[in-house]
Each structure stands twice: as C-alpha cells, then as structure tokens.
Image: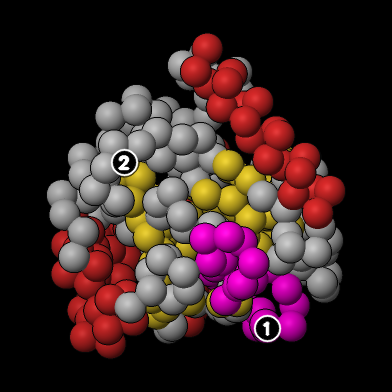
C-alpha cells in the first residue's frame, strides 16, 4: 500500500466522522485541553501490518530517566518502508486539511524532519510522567499546536496500561484515554495541556505512530516559549518536587545554550516517498 493510498484512507476516515470529531474537540476534555478520538482509522489488516513493521526494541533508542521510560525512533530510513508511509500519511495535505476542518486551528503544517514525531514503543513497567510539550519547532519559529497519536498494538486493552492521560492545569485530576488498537487521538498542545502515559502492566509492546503539527499562531494567543516540562503524579510528591527543579534547571540551560545540550535527533532521509 502506497503513501498516497494511506493518506487518502486517513483523510476519508476523518471526513466520515468530522461532525462528531468537531463536537468532541470543541469542548475541553479536561481543564483547558481539547482532544478527540477516532477509532477504526485504517483497515485492520493495514494497521496490523504497521505493528508488525515496527523495529525491534534493541534497534530503537531507549529513553530511561526518572521522567520517562520508553523506546523511540525516527530513523525511518533504516526501517520497513511501511513505517515511513504510516508516519508521513498523517502529514499529507489532505489529512492536514481534514484535521483543520475538525479543530479550527489555522495555517498548520506537518513535521517533515520529525523533530517532534516518530514512533515509540513501551513494554512492561515503562511510562511517561505528566508533562507539557516544548512550545516550538526545532528552529523556534513555529508553535507546536497539535499532537496526533495513532496506536497500532492489536488486541490492546485498557487494563493493560500504557494509556494516554490528560490532566487539568494543576495536574490533580485526569482523564484516561485507552491506547486501543487502530485508534487516533488528536490533542491540542499548549502551556496547560498536561498529559502522560501510565505504566504498562502486561508483557507485550504498546506501539504508537506520533505526529505533530506546527503553526505560526500561538495556541494561547500570546507569545510564550517553554521546554518540555515534567511533573510528578499527584501520589508522588517527591518526584513532583524533583521534576519541577529539573524543569527549571533545563530551562536555564536552554536559555544559555539555545539548542540545548541534548542529542539533536531529526530525520535526514530527504523528502517523503511517493
């Protein structure tokens, strides 16, 4: 199946449920965060093929800190071509147009360098603590405004864990969105859109294809710049203290070293495949 075929199917599926998705997105899910959920995004056989095409854990980058534990990669030039096409299908103009009609956000563009996007996998015990995403693209010119998270683990159940959680502004109340097979979550991202992934409770691999949209317009209507900032969960006061201190320290480093000290990890494989 080609990139063009995948993007057409995604766009058509979004358009099919556009009215219901607009209604979901129009009302904040929790706090000020708006999101909508679309199931059965692609034919089952296609979604299963994307899952099977995921690289082995040892061929991905392990993120292992007190803030998060997961495998990630954006080195799609070394992966099954289907992973490349699954990623970039969500950046096709017709898909961005369909998402624009649902969210009402203006002048959005995709992320061809995969500065923010890529694939991720989580196994038993892994997690991602509450956080807000960094505010801009790699050049600091465009605001990050939208997350598109597509889950492809067959048979994944809510009780398995590894589910997306949306939090209120004080990171006290949460809404859990299970990472079910063939499900797409479209979520706004701004300075109050705290979100996390709870611990995976079973053996197996929770896989996600992640895309992010950027815009020249601030999602809050005001100029703001911030790094990815973590919090602890409400039941983890010590981790919450450490995460806050860590966030301020990393903010200071970013002010002193504009591109930060972390590994610059972007896709350098050229334009998307036809």
Q: How many marks?
A: 2
| Residue 232, x across and y down, in percent | 72, 53
In the displayed structure image, the side of residue 92 where residue 243 appears, left or right = right
Mark positioned earlier in the residue sequence (2 or 1):
2
Name the residue rendered at 65%, 26% in the picture: 249
Mark 2 surroundings: few (<14), some (14-19) or many (≥20) residues within 10 A: many
Where are the magenta residues, as a range?
Answer: 151-175
Q: Position of residue 149 (x, y in %)?
A: 47, 63
Query: Callout 1 environment at 10 Å: few (<14), some (14 to 19), or many (20+)?
Result: some
* Residue 143 image label: 2
Residue drawn where x is 63% and y is 46% of the image: 230
Q: Nearer the viewer, residue 2 or 100?
A: 100
Query: Which residue is at 82% across, 73% downward?
Result: 202
Question: Quick check: 230 above or below 174?
Answer: above
Q: Which residue is mark 1?
A: 157
Residue placed most toward the observer, 29 or 144: 29
Instruction: Describe the element under mark 1 as helix, strand or loop.
Output: loop
Secondary-structure class at tag 2: strand
- Residue 216 horizontal side relative to residue 234, left or right: left
Name the residue nearer the viewer: 73 or 83: 73
């Amino acid at each position: 199946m080609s990139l063009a075929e995948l993007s057409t199917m995604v766009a058509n599926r979004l358009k099919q449920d556009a009215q219901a998705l607009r209604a979901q997105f129009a009302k904040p899910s929790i706090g000020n965060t708006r999101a909508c959920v679309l199931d059965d995004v692609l034919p089952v056989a296609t979604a299963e093929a994307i899952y099977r095409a995921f690289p082995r854990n040892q061929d991905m980058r392990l993120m292992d800190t007190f803030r998060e534990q997961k495998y990630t990669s954006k080195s799609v030039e070394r992966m099954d071509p289907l992973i490349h096409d699954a990623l970039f299908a969500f950046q096709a103009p017709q898909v961005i147009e369909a998402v624009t009609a649902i969210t009402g956000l203006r002048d959005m563009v995709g992320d061809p360098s995969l500065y923010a996007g890529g694939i991720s996998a989580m196994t038993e015990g892994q997690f991602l603590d509450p956080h807000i995403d960094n505010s801009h693209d790699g050049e600091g010119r465009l605001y990050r405004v939208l997350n598109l998270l597509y889950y492809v683990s067959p048979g994944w159940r809510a009780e398995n864990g590894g589910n997306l959680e949306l939090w209120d502004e004080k990171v006290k109340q949460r809404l859990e969105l299970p990472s079910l097979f063939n499900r797409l979550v479209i979520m706004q991202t701004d300075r109050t859109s705290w979100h996390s992934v709870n611990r995976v409770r079973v053996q197996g691999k929770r896989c996600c294809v992640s895309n992010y949209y950027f815009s020249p317009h601030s999602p809050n209507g005001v100029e703001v710049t911030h790094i990815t900032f973590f919090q602890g969960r409400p039941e983890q006061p010590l981790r919450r203290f450490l995460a806050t201190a860590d966030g301020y320290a990393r903010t200071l480093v970013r002010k002193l070293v504009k591109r930060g000290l972390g590994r610059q990890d972007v896709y350098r494989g050229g334009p998307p495949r036809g």
